[in-house]
Amino acid sequence: MKRDLYETLGVGKTADEKELKGAFRKLAMKYHPDKNPGDAEAEKTFKDISHAYETLKDPQKRAAYDRYGHAAFENGGMGGGGGGFGGAGAGGFSDIFEDIFGEMMGGGRQRRSSGGRERGADLRYNMEISLEEAYSGKTAQIRVPTSITCDVCSGSGAKPGTKPQTCGTCQGSGRVRAAQGFFSIERTCPTCHGRGQTITDPCGKCHGQGRVTEERSLSVNIPAGIEDGTRIRLSGEGEAGLRGGPAGDLYIFLSVKPHEFYQRDGADLYCSVPISMTTAALGGKFDVATLDGTKSRVSVPEGTQAGKQFRLKGKGMPVLRSSQIGDLYIQIQIETPQKLTKRQRELLREFEELSSKDNNPESAGFFSRMKDFFDIE
């Protein structure tokens, strides 16, 4: 009696595609012929679980099996393809196998080589700029150690006058097939390592790599309004590819140094300015320097309180790639005088005696509300 396919995979009849694949992966890893050489029982079990998964992963085959059981595939049912791997079709079991067992075969599917050419790696460069430079933008010169195409062999890796040869093991495909029991497995060619070509007479300068390490000088345009953490991509300025392959990209990661006076929030700037108690009480004026190289005057009205903000329109940061400019917000801090002389203390006490609730409405109102709230006499 044939064993139930769901039971073979160890899943319930309501299992979805993800559960089926997970169960198959777990069992296939355990019973794969490569892990059990010469074990006929393990090979049979692997064939059974492969057949079960191949059947249940196909919605039409699964529906037929759920309704008729194994009889659905007997006597020519479902095209007679349910009894083995013949019904997998193009992109069927072979694709599933490569996806699931890639790690066992040295990394799974790999991009096929094209004449041994491989794309170069992307590079990262960290750059720190000032807030003033972020405000106005700049063109910066940087030096980046990287791999560039060898000028002796023009990136081929072969000694001048020679050229790479098609790999005799894989015939240029970069992949070879090996028999494993009742099926075959495709692996990366061990001779050319997937490149499809071999170099018998390598270039003396790059030793067959087609590239050499060198420090390059590059110009980087930093636009006005750039923000902290912005990434700038320079296409093709990364590491040169192997044997004439395309170069990778260079990514510039920008960080903006903290400013001594200004804090940034998007396009707006904030600055905390301390003023004297008398300026806050009587009113006054002061100048602040802005990032555009000018000065702006701030008028402080009589009776200004701590925390009061004044907005200077258009004195903030430019918005990247637009004509808009943010604002500058000045927040007032009131400084309490220190190290008072005897005469200053006398004047302050006299001022206190002459003060009324109208001079300090917020404090008078606060303590009045507190007394009412707690019913304090």
Image: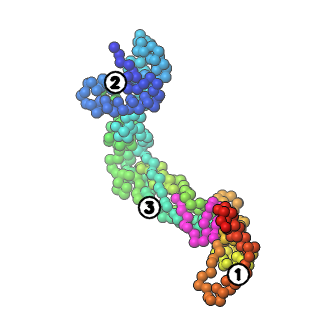
Residue sitting at 37 percent across and 55 percent down?
206
Camera-near label (2 vs 3) is 2
Q: Evaluate whether residue 73 shows in this view.
A: no
Measured as percent of width and height from the top left, residue 279 is found at 70, 78
Measured as percent of width and height from the top left, residue 335 is found at 63, 77
Image quadrant for the N terminus? top left
> Could you tell me how far apart the alpha carbons at marks 1 and 2 are, in whole angstroms?
101 Å
**Where are the magenta residues, as a range?**
253-272
Compare residues 126 and 316 and report the one nearer the observer.
316
Compare residues 274 and 358 and report the one nearer the observer.
358
Q: Residues within 10 Å of mark 2 (few under 14, many from 20)?
A: some
What residue did someone put label 3 on?
145
Are discs 2 and 3 less than 8 Å apart at CB? no
Upstream in the sequence, badge 1 or badge 3?
3
Measured as percent of width and height from the top left, residue 265 is found at 62, 61
Compare residues 281 and 130 and report the one nearer the observer.
281
